Amino acid sequence: MTVASAAVLPSADEEVWRYSRIGELDLAAFEPAAVKSTVTGAEKLPAVDESLISRLVAGLTMHDSFDELSAEFNCTVAISVPSGIVLHEPIVVTHHIEGDAAALYPRLVVHGGANSEFTVVERFESSDDTRALVVPRLVLQADQAARVSYLGINLLGPRVWQLAHQQATGERDSTTLLATVALGGDYARVRTDARLVGQGATTKQVALYYADGTQMHDFRTLQDHVAPRTNSDLLFKGAVQDSAKSVYTGLIRIREDAKGSVAFQTNRNLTLSEGAWAESVPNLDIRTNDVKCSHASTVGPIDEEQRFYLESRGIPPDVAERLVVLGFFDDVLALLPVGELRRDLRARVAAKLHHVDSRAGATR
């Protein structure tokens, strides 16, 4: 049975797929396969009740045929931290993307019991010669006063497509952090819906993305305030070089009963090459009064004053550019929930910059 026989592709004519490369996907070229996943840091947790998994998955909003395919072919990893438990070390889930022309449907279900606190890191990794379609799904539930942090890291090879959907739900007085670092893949899309259904719930979304060559990163976000006096904040920063592209489309929705809510949304983009392209589309949907909301977005080249300042102190132009870009990402890196990963991720960003510097040097 082929994947194509089970689904009809969405179209770029649909607003939610606008600017995407979905028209390039040949779904019939991929066959469903099992995902090789490893989990560390959860060894002392009790087994997750199947009824809990079913209940949480049932709450996942089905947007398109890829959600339906995930429901049919998924390989699920479930993590549940009981009420009152605080974990000081992160739980790390690594998906090893392998094979040729494989369609992989990893699903991660994360539940935080009342007043629990923990971090989950989800890594997607493949070799450079792996050709695959990866369709991840994240279902995250934070019960009352739970503090749950999630970090997704895309280190996929240049022949892999990723079409991800994340849904997080925060109950009363809970705190959720949804963080993404996107460096790999050919076309990598992440749709994140953060729902605040309990009074006093707080959520933060942060992302760092960097595309070079012909890569494209595509983000869709929803900050959905359902209950009163809820808070959300979003900071996404990206850079594109060569002929790479990025798209960010975000929506803050304040529903009728969400009085007293506060929401912020910020997206900043650097275009490092003449052929690079970035699009940023923030939106507001406010259905009540007594709220505080703002959004901001920028797309543009490196700040010439910052570059000039460094060059005037004897720093070579290529090094000055690298320092400015790394500084641009520093505030996002500082918000990542796993501090020891920051050095590695910063080095990976620097390696992309060094790659373009090397090419530029070769043409001088």
Image (cartoon, grey):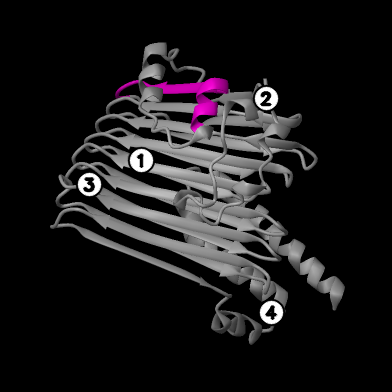
Question: Looking at the image, is 128 positioned above or below residue 235?
Answer: above
Mark 3 to mark 4 CA distance (whole Å)? 46 Å
Q: Earlier in the sequence, mark 2 or mark 1?
A: 2
Question: Looking at the image, is 80 positioned above or below residue 15?
Answer: above
Q: Secondary structure at mark 2?
A: loop
Could you say which disc has been placed on residue 254 in the image? none
Q: Secondary structure at mark 4?
A: loop
- The furthest residue to the bottom: 312
Mark 1 — residue? Answer: 176
Q: Is residue 206 visible?
A: yes
Mark 4 — residue? Answer: 315
Q: Position of residue 338 (x, y in %)?
A: 50, 43
Which quadrant of the figure has residue 9?
top right
Mark 3 — residue? Answer: 230
**Amino acid type, callout 4:** Ile
In this picture, residue 104 sits left or right of residue 119: right
Q: Earlier in the sequence, mark 1 or mark 4?
A: 1
The residue sitting at 76% across, 68% down in the picture is 357
Crowding at dot 1, Cα within 10 Å, few <14 / some 14-19 / many 20+, comes out as: many
Q: Secondary structure at mark 1?
A: strand
Q: Position of residue 322 (x, y in %)?
A: 65, 69
The residue sitting at 68% across, 70% down in the picture is 275
Crowding at dot 2, Cα within 10 Å, few <14 / some 14-19 / many 20+, comes out as: few
Question: Looking at the image, is 67 positioned above or below residue 208?
Answer: above
